[in-house]
Amino acid sequence: MIYAASPLAIVIFTIFVLAVLGISFYFARQTSSSKGYYTAGGTISWPVNGIAFAGDYLSAASFLGICGMIATAGYDGFLYSIGYLAGWVVALFVVAEPMKRLGKYTFTDALDSKFNSKGIQLAAGISSLVVSIFYLIPQMVGAGALVTPLLGLPHYAGVIMVGTIVIIIVATAGMKSTTYVQFLKGGLLILFSTILVFSILSKGLSRKPSDEYHEFATVKAEISSGRVISSDPSYTVVGQQRSGDLDFIKMRKNGVDRWWLVKDSGKGVYMQECLSRTKKADGSVLYNGEAKEAGKFFPVGHMSSITSGGREVDSTGPLGPFSFFSVIKDSRIVRFPETVISDNADKVTVWYQNETEGKKILRPGLKFKIDKGASTTSKLNFVSLMLSLFFGTAALPHVLIRYYTVPSPADARKSTIVAIAAIGFFYVLTLYMGIGAMVNGVLDVESSNMAAPLLAKTFGIFLFAVISAIAFATVLGTVSGLIVAASGAVARDLMSSFMGIKLSDKGMVKAGKISAVVVGGIAILLGILFRGMNVSFLVGLAFAIAASANLPAIIMILFWKKTTAAGVTASITTGMVSALGIILLSPSMYAKYGFNPADAVFPIDNPGIISIPLSFFVLIAVSLLTAKKTLPGKV
Amino acid sequence: MDHGPAVQYGPDNAAGFKTRLGLILFFFYAFVYGVFVFINTVNPVMMEQEIFAGLNLAIVYGFGLILFAVILGVIYNYVCTRKELELNTDKEGENI
């Protein structure tokens, strides 16, 4: 899609960014000690910390990724919302208070509180760093996706912009500024998402989403001697390719070649207009047969039939929160799945029309292969994802460090409940926003991540600008929190604790800030490399690593007295290495490398179902083997 | 390097009770979540069934899991706070 920057959007965006920087500089003057830098001095009240938790958690993955995934795959995207929220139950009932009691600055402190073990310090420090970086990648990808429609800048510019601003924020102020930025941003995100959902329901559903929406054409066809011929003489068939069981025809009109999907209704053959991106052998790229600037690469997403109250209608008028889903369930929606074909030396990505019953949109099965004909592997992949989401939240370093910003364990508990209520409410909204984007003709087929902001654009440039600016602040805040967690892991766990480098209190803060600059630089690089991948999918991988590396150690230290330092070290290492290994050798990563996904060493994308139990098993086995040999402080 | 807690809190006589309650509620929620994942995995078509007001099982169960987490959290906090007041208060009514 071609995005044009709006002056109002730029002004609102600039105000938001300046406000975030202003808060940072204001709190920078109050932060000089390491306790202030890493934990805001433990002075944050529980209601503020609860909303800041929500701000941390409702990252680019939640707002951009989940809405985008729902907009393209229906209810399957909402399963991420459910899994992310359910993970807070583990945090509240199992982890919150004990972690607050045990720890000081980082979750390594809590793990190591009984042992003072070099092994734990090294393994937990590296694990925090790895999880934080995996969580940073999708935030940066989301930032890149945002600035393109907002400011008309390329993806890499957004990534560099976020990275630079966040490095300034973190290198100046630390956890206190991050907390207040997250508090404001979390509150505003929920408020404006609610306004957006009200707008969706007030508008209702219509077969023509907007006056500007492109009417995708259908042309009758005939088959003669096995060849498809257009009934409309203005089109000339110039090519034919097959992808799986789909037949595509390339037709020329006015000198422009476009791709069409051949359909046989039983009563006759016809062709449906597609969207295409052609990478020519000479390196040039055509969008729907023309240069991108021609503006012929249209936004998509509409309903082919709407059934309301038992009869077909063209539009519904305003709908209630229940009737919205009821009408969607009884109607038919046109999605645009993607397939890739080779046309001589050209590589063509085609997005074709796929009319889907609403009842299938509102139940699982469009993305996750769990329906009829699904293999055991694909079902395991799904269970593995849901397991990782459930156990990942309570093991994320940037979530865990927030328990140290409140004064007491009871405050940690109360702030978690505020977080669950705020996050839960937002996740309910994601289903409305995602389905709203699916049927309102706003989707960019090249990037699902922009579904929610582009949906806001249909209700006016002001809402779009505010929502986009909040989303950008979302990325800023989450990245800030992650970089504080990562810099804490480097400066405290690795440099000070493991390597034994003597640092003064100010030296500790300085080391953290230098680490923040380095980690920020790595995040910028990875954010550019991973462009185009759904951010929620990427966050799912970070959850899997956290759940595998950190959670078994946390749980067993809290509830199994025979846990030893060697067991914890082995468990963290095993969980991290196995989860990372499976991810790097998975079908999705093979596709990213340019290999055939079917050749992947591991047939599943989500490692949790293997790596989480393995990490538990290793902890128990090593602890039993080293039970009598290990004394505190000797590992 | 000192890895102990940042603040030394007074003894929490309610800690054992809160841990037990937390684990009970965790396993209860994990069971309900597990049933949800199980149905989705073995019989996703079942999620199409209409439950009420035109909403299908998938939406009712999904929204229900979110609401259920909030309700359990509020109950947990209410019970824990009462227990803390009961067990962590000395005879003169001062918090320990």
Image: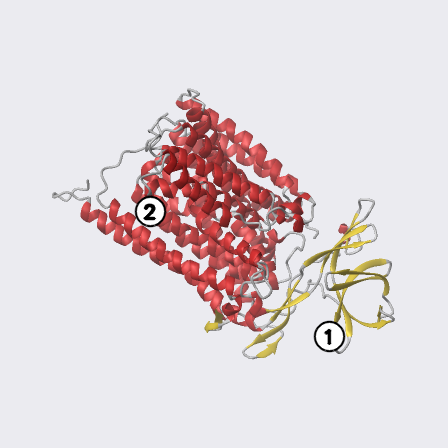
Horizontal and vertical percent for residue A490?
A: 48, 29
Name the residue type under label 1: Ser
Please give the label number shown on residue A83. none
- The residue that appears at 80% across and 44% down in the rendered structure is A283
Location of mark 1 (residue) = A265
How was this image coloured? secondary structure
Residue A19 appears in the picture as rendered:
no
Q: Quadrant of residue A69?
A: bottom right
Mark 2 vs mark 1, foreground winner is 1
Horizontal and vertical percent for residue A583?
A: 57, 44
Location of mark 2 (residue) = A413
Dot 2 falls on a residue whose secondary structure is helix
How packed mark 1 is, by other alpha carbons closer than 10 Å (few <14, some 14-19, many 20 or more), is few
Residue with the most extreme left position: B91
Pointer 1 chain: A
Horizontal and vertical percent for residue B66?
A: 42, 58
Earlier along the polypeptide chain: callout 2 or callout 1?
Answer: 1
Tell me if A251 is positioned left or right of A96 in this view. right
Tell me if A460 is positioned left or right of A551 in this view. right
Residue A258 appears in the picture as rendered:
yes
**A192 vs A179: above or below:** below
How packed mark 2 is, by other alpha carbons closer than 10 Å (few <14, some 14-19, many 20 or more), is many
